[in-house]
Amino acid sequence: MRAMAIKGLVIGLALLALGCGSSEPQKDKLFPPQAAKWSDYQGQSVDLRDYEGKVVLVNFWATWCGPCRYEIPALVEMSNDYDPEQVAIIGISLDQGPPERVLPLIGEFVERLAINYPVVHDSQHELLRAFYKENLARVGVPLTFIFDRQGRVYKRHIGVPRDKSGRLNPRGVFSEDIETLLARS
């Protein structure tokens, strides 16, 4: 029993470390075509083509992820702050398990955090593989991509991003990225 507890602690700390944040500029990668259409956790159709011409923030998360729970309220505030004709935020849950168990869990999470943007469920990590071309074993959540108006990846943030002072500041960092892209047009 003690060995299982230690193993769980090590895994938890590793996941937490993955959530501690790095921001990487990305160039010349377009919305992955295989990610163009999918359904949200309630079965409603979501199509990336509906977001053409907008700055788009795509955030991968999971209900069990502490750093995600820290970051999502900033995304909710940002969704209220930005003109939906200019900026879109999309959440993608990576929770795994049978849909009859996981989808209600996601729904409760969305309600509890008052998430006000589309949330997609990606239990098989198909969307994650479409967006993140590198080794999935080396990725953690939250994972956020910010796309420019042409659908190119502008930035990729692994973990909760830190501002220039080193403080965890998802709203500040994401807003700075979005404002930079909005100023370009």
Image (tube, grey):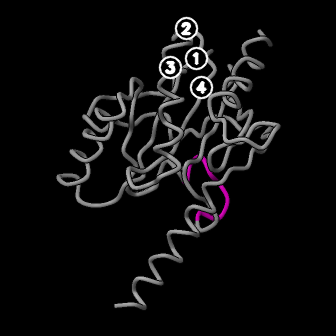
178 or 29: nearer the viewer? 178
- Residue 173 location, x and y as percent? 71, 31
Q: Are marks 3 and 2 in contact (CB under 8 Å)?
A: no
Q: Is residue 165 above or below residue 22?
A: above
Relative side of 110 to 60, left or right? left
Query: What amino acid type should be assigned to the residue bearing mark 2?
Result: Asp
- Toward the left, the furthest residue is 100
- Kindly state the secondary structure of the residue where label 1 is placed: strand
Give the distance between the C-alpha atoms of the residues marked 1 and 4, in whole angstroms. 6 Å
Q: Which mark is residue 56?
A: 4
Give the distance between the C-alpha atoms of the residues marked 2 and 1, in whole angstroms. 6 Å
Query: Which residue, given by chain and number where applicable, does mark 1 sit on?
Result: 87
Query: Which residue, given by chain and number where applicable, does mark 2 sit on?
Result: 83
- Residue 61 location, x and y as percent? 47, 47
Q: Are marks 2 and 1 in contact (CB under 8 Å)?
A: yes
Give the mark nearest the N terminus, 2 or 4. 4
165 or 175: nearer the viewer? 165
The residue at the point 71 percent across, 35 percent down is 153
The residue at the point 66 percent across, 50 percent down is 158
Q: Residues within 10 Å of mark 4 (few under 14, many from 20)?
A: many
Q: Are marks 1 and 4 in contact (CB under 8 Å)?
A: yes
